[in-house]
Amino acid sequence: MALGEAKARKRAYDELLTKSPFCVFCGGNTRAVTVDHIPAKVMFDGKQRPKGLEFSACEICNNGAKHADLVAAWVGRFYPDPKTNEQKEEIPKLLKAINNNIPGLLQEMKMGRGAEKLAMRKLPIEIDGGLLHVGPLLQKYMQVFSLKLGLALYYEVSGNILPETGGIAVRWFSNYEKFTGDFPDQLANFLGPSKTLVAGKKHVSDQFQYAWEIAENKEFGIYFASFRMSFAVFAAAALDPKVIALPAGEDGLKVYSPIDVKALIQSL
């Protein structure tokens, strides 16, 4: 990075921290000391991420969730298969980083041959590649990624930090659920037009899109983000946790406070 570019970035970060001095992820009572990119640069091909969706964060909420970003980056590259040499070269780097930092995750994600055959039979179409097993370790890291994403979009759209007394519920969906009809298309259709990150003529809509619908008083909103054709995240956030309506059949979804989210990050 050129010296001038580094100075410009530091100046932009300082301005953001001055404008928004508190962490947007843990209730707004902790001083922000870093700038967090949601989604992280590692989610994008060659880490080429246009500016935008950058948020003030405390050290724990930012750096404590780095491994969750790694996991989401790996899951986000499951489909479609990488085509360019650059895309192909990123896969072993991600695998090595996950194996070094999250022991046991890659082993947990492997689906047995018999289980994979049974799962394949449920698909209405044939797909290339294999399937991943969603175990407790993968679920925990994807939950942290999804919660931070939901809190970031709540702040981006409403202009306010979700307070400690607020609540957020999230659910991430794999492309397998899309293929089998378990994806809530009716909810996605309810949202506004999708957006992505853009820099001049460059955009990353093939890798990331997001949309939302928010109440006029900004006290409640639902948010959606998709990553390539691999997975998607739905989030509902509200000043009053009691007003969050969970999707039918998803009674097991937990409503988190921002303090809960920080504790979950610290447990990784």
Image (tube, rainbow, N blue to C red):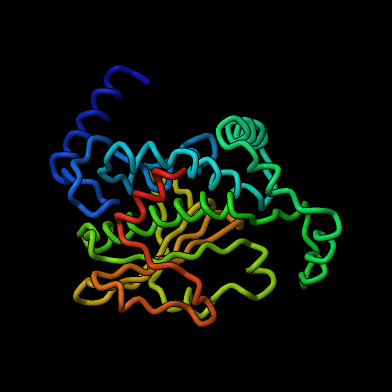
Q: Is residue 183 shown above or below 143?
A: below
Indicate the quadrant where residue 150 lies.
bottom left
Compared across the picture, whether 218 is left or right of 147 comes to: left
Residue 261 lies, in percent from the top left, at: 36, 54
Residue 50 lies, in percent from the top left, at: 39, 42
Residue at image coords 28%, 46% = 55
Q: Nearer the viewer, residue 16 or 120?
A: 120
Res. 86 in view: no
Compared across the picture, whether 124 is left or right of 67 comes to: right
Residue at image coords 16%, 43% = 21
Residue 51 lies, in percent from the top left, at: 34, 42
Q: Quadrant of the N terminus?
A: top left
Residue at image coords 40%, 74% = 191
Indicate the quadrant where residue 235 lies.
bottom left
Residue 26 lies, in percent from the top left, at: 27, 51
Res. 151 in view: yes
